[in-house]
Amino acid sequence: MTTTHLGRLSDRVAIITGAGHGIGKVYARRFVAEGASVVLADIDGSSVEEGAEELRKKGFQAIGVQVDVRDQGSMNAMADAATSAFGKITVLINNAALFATVPMSRSPFNEIEVEEWDRMMAINLRGPWLAARAVFPAMTKQGYGKVVNISSGTALKGSASRIHYVTSKAGILGFTKTLAREMAPSGITVNCVAPGSTLSEEHPDADTLAMRDAAKSDRAIARVQHPSDLEGAVVFFASADSDFITGQTLVIDGGSFMH
Ligand SMILES: NC(=O)c1ccc[n+]([C@@H]2O[C@H](COP(=O)([O-])OP(=O)(O)OC[C@H]3O[C@@H](n4cnc5c(N)ncnc54)[C@H](O)[C@@H]3O)[C@@H](O)[C@H]2O)c1
């Protein structure tokens, strides 16, 4: 099936955190195809430099910035880079996480190290909060903005391991609702996408392929989920089509968790 790009994000400037690898990189490619200028932000600086260069070579507007979402100074510098390059910030996609590229352990709850628990919360929860704080002045000034947070289906269904990750992604659900209420007076919508298990790894090993394949079993649409399955919903929440929708979480998992 071919996807028609309709310029849904024309004249929008989007910051995508965690855009160096995996699903965030795929969002960046789709966003420019929909007409956006993008800021690819990642702790892996060379990945976003290369990603932005690849997009510019195709005639798109893109810059790469090396960031650490745990740090307010770094998030402020990211927002400054966006406004310096493109004059405004319309969209923030809070996608960076401790997950696959910067890997987490998939241990039982009583074996996870305290240090990793704290690192998880710093990246997956403090990060989106600091990023939201950083873009808020620019969005408030223009009286318009779109924030899209990335949670996980595991926050709705539970998981038999990695309680630190699931807890952080459950935090994103409440974070989304509260931020939606606080930002609405400034004309900013805040929504959330909760992906199911997605084959996002660039070089998946046999165990990873088996894990992603096993997720088919409780889906109404019984196939492996790919990053491209998520793009449309994120574009929707970043576009004017969702301007009267805020505080919502959309589950994208082929009909595994239904609510
Ligand atoms: N793949 C899945 O099965 C799945 C399922 C549900 C939710 N998600 C969520 O989707 C998002 C993308 O996941 P992915 O599968 O592409 O994983 P990924 O690990 O490939 O991508 C995360 C990105 O965040 C970056 N990052 C890590 N720490 C950072 C930091 N401190 N500052 C800035 N950037 C940092 C990484 O370098 C990486 O590029 C994540 O929020 C993840 O939790 C993924």
Image (spheres, helix red, strand yellow):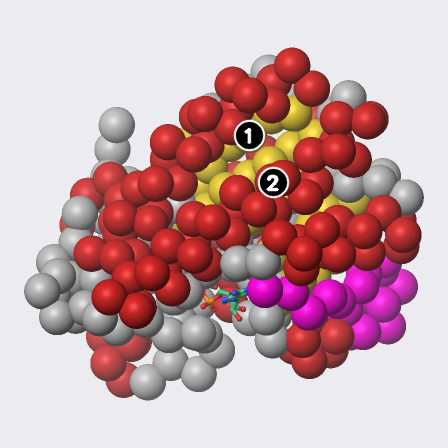
Q: Is residue 62 magenta?
A: yes
Q: Where residue 15 appears, x then y in whole percent?
A: 69, 50
Q: Is residue 42 visible?
A: yes
Q: Is residue 151 above or below residue 118?
A: above
Which type of secondary structure does the marked residue at label 1 adopt?
Answer: strand
Q: Where residue 234 appears, x then y in whole percent?
A: 56, 42
Q: Is residue 58 visible?
A: no
Give the number of the disc on residue 166: none
Q: What kind of residue is marked 1?
A: Val
Quarter occupied by residue 92: top right
Q: Is residue 207 above or below residue 234?
A: below
- Locate residue 97 relative to residue 166 in the image: left or right: right
What residue sits 43% from the left and 34% below the top?
175
Q: Is residue 46 above or below residue 167?
A: below
> As rendered, which of 11 and 70 lies closer to the eye?
70
What residue sits 51% from the left and 52% below the top?
127
What residue sits 78% from the left and 35% below the top?
138
Q: Quickly name the residue at label 2.
A: 132
Q: Where residue 125 appears, x then y in whole percent?
A: 43, 48
Whole-angstrom CA distance, mark 1 to mark 2, is 10 Å
> As rendered, which of 34 and 108 lies closer to the eye?
108
Among numbered discs 1 and 2, the one appearing first in the sequence: 2
Q: Quickly name the residue at label 1.
A: 190
Quarter occupied by residue 109: bottom left
- Locate residue 160 relative to residue 98 in the image: left or right: left
- Locate residue 136 relative to residue 116 in the image: left or right: right
Which type of secondary structure does the marked residue at label 2 adopt?
Answer: helix
What residue sits 65% from the left and 14% below the top?
185
- Locate residue 186 relative to residue 218 in the image: left or right: right
Quarter occupied by residue 98: bottom left
| Nearest to viewer (mark 1 / mark 2) | 2
Residues in magenta, as a range: 51-68
